[in-house]
Image: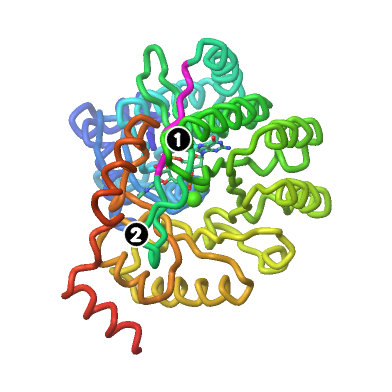
Amino acid sequence: MLVEIANFISLRRHVGKARAAGLSRDVAARVAAAYPDVRLHPASASLLEIDFEGDTAEDLAVCLAAIRALCDAPFDLDGEQHRIELIFAAAVCAAERADEVRLTEEAEAALAEARAGNRAVTHDLVQPGRREVQRLGRELDLAIARNELLIQYQPKVHVRRQEIGSAEALIRWRHPTRGLVLPGDFIPAAEQAHLIDRLTLWTIRQVIADHQRLADRGHDLRLFINISGQLLSDEAFVREACALVGESDAKLGFEITETSVIRDPVGAIANLQIFADSGVVIAIDDYGAGLSSLAYLKQLPARELKIDKLFVTQLTSSNRDPLIVRSTIDLAHALEMEVVAEGVESHAAMALLTVMGCDMVQGFLISRPITLEALETFLSDQRARPAVADARPGLRALATAWARR
Ligand code: C2E
Ligand code: CA
Ligand code: CA
């Protein structure tokens, strides 16, 4: 957040150059008293930079309103009460993708707009703007034509069988100037630009070809594809996807989020049933993140439930998450679904999940997402060794102790 003193010139005339030089520090002091957690950098006499983290992008608006209210009361400048008029501008982005340079540039651009429009302006990099979406849409359109998209696979290990029975296809974009772009940075734009149907049909074709190549080399895996919610009510997509699936004998799975059926439950569930009937295994992705509605869970023709990595990565450091994970596993089993834990990064998490009865695990502990060639090597290597090193004895004791609780 950038906070600029709008009436700096007139205040300086009044209090003198020397006192005015510290004005942004006056504002900083007031903010610091109310918000000890934010980081304050007086950038100049008239400009204050405030850095902070929140749980959601909406926290920015809340924080901005609070600081504005806080600074509304007059300031004591050498015994005189003065109002400091402030201009607010800010930029917000997802913490895991925080790029300080970009964030500062966006905040500065927002400040220029705020000055001109005499109002607070925030730039939201979490939700790309319309122009950004249009630009990305055009680029992505070209990317499909130029073959810049590629798929990496992340294996899922069946815990009891100690074997890799499936893998998830994760799309990447080998961008000519930006390097490898991860899906979080272009899937939302592809959805907004109505390119997600083409992109997903491309992915299905590619995955079918890769499945064939794996089968030719003796690897019998089910390959899972992520399907955006909006596609489930897109009749043209469903028709084309069904045709592709029907023509091939590849073992496929679709990962969908539970909330993706909320917009049009009857249509979406009917379409999922069509896929399920043609042999596609349906998995419910990101379970527990965001809105989960048990009302739909029972109606979905799903065979797998994936516990969101948010719970899994914190499994061994939080008191609450193990309970959520264990009850989710029990619930899924009651509904005759298999449970996949995603985001398994440690042996400790793996051990705990094993005793909790989790059926499958996926995560950096086993493998990062890798190219098809690397997957082939990985699968061949695994034939020689067991799929995953078993949980170490010490951790196993910990897990057993937990299971008895
Ligand atoms: P997702 O379906 O939840 O995919 C799992 C994400 O978790 C992947 O990120 C993966 O790299 C990451 N991950 C895997 N193991 C671990 C771990 O042990 N720890 C942690 N912290 N993370 C792990 P990625 O590849 O960046 O994908 C992000 C999201 O993009 C996916 O989330 C999925 O929703 C979406 N996506 C990916 N490919 C496609 C696609 O072809 N179509 C659509 N519609 N969405 C896609
Ligand atoms: Ca997924
Ligand atoms: Ca997921």
Quadrant where the C terminus sits is bottom left
Q: Amino acid at mark 1?
A: Leu
| Location of residue 23 with respect to 156 vertically, above or below | above
- The residue segment tinted magenta is 148-154
Instruction: Determine whether the beta carbon of the residue marked 2 sits less than 8 angstroms from the nearest atom of ligand 1.
Output: yes
Q: Secondary structure at mark 1?
A: helix
Question: Which residue has dot 2 on it?
Answer: 313
Q: Which residue is rendered at x = 37% and y = 39% of the image?
A: 369
Magenta-colored segment: predominant secondary structure: strand
Query: Would residue 293 be counted in the magenta stretch?
Result: no
Q: Is residue 301 left or right of residue 376?
A: right
Visible in this render: residue 87?
A: no
Question: Which residue has dot 1 on it?
Answer: 214
Q: x, y (%) of residue 150?
A: 45, 25
Visible in this render: residue 151?
A: yes
Q: Which residue is rendered at x = 37% and y = 69% of the image?
A: 353
| Residue 296 lies in quadrant | bottom right
Q: Residue furthest bottom?
A: 405
Q: x, y (%) of residue 269?
A: 77, 53
Quadrant where the N terminus sits is top left
